Image: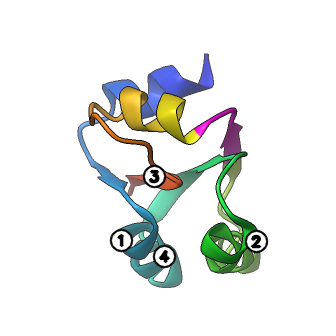
Amino acid sequence: MSLDRIRLEKKRIIGTNQTLKAVQQSAVKEVFVAKDAEARVIGPVLHYAEQNGIPVTWVETMKMLGKACGIEVGAATAAILE
């Protein structure tokens, strides 16, 4: 399952601001994006991920992504670092 990769990874970041900064610096192997996140929030992350050739994995809900990352709240985006 795709969430196992983010769940087991030690070098990861959680949250849109941190993910966006890392994607802009091409310091990311893979980005995880929640389908139910607002488009205006995830749009810049998706733009830079596509521009930098970083694969994007879609997750059904923010709650599922947050839980996979080990936090109690939902997460719009997360990423595995290089």
Is 54 located above or below residue 36 in the figure?
Answer: below
Q: Quick check: marks 1 and 4 in contact, CB under 8 Å?
A: yes
Name the residue beneath numbered marker 1.
18
Residue 52 is labelled as none
Please give the residue where the numbered disc 2 appears in the rendered image: 50
Read off the residue under disc 4: 20
Q: Residue at x 45, y 49 (%)?
A: 75
Q: Are marks 1 and 2 in contact (CB under 8 Å)?
A: no
Badge 1 local density, few (<14 within 10 Å), some, or many (20+)?
few
Q: Which mark is residue 78?
A: 3
Q: Are marks 4 and 2 in contact (CB under 8 Å)?
A: no
Position of the C terminus, as image quadrant, is bottom left
Identify residue type, mark 2: Glu
Judge the density around disc 4: few (<14), some (14-19), many (≥20) Cα neighbours within 10 Å.
many
Q: Which residues are magenta?
A: 57-61
Quick one: label 1 or label 2, which is nearer the N terminus? 1
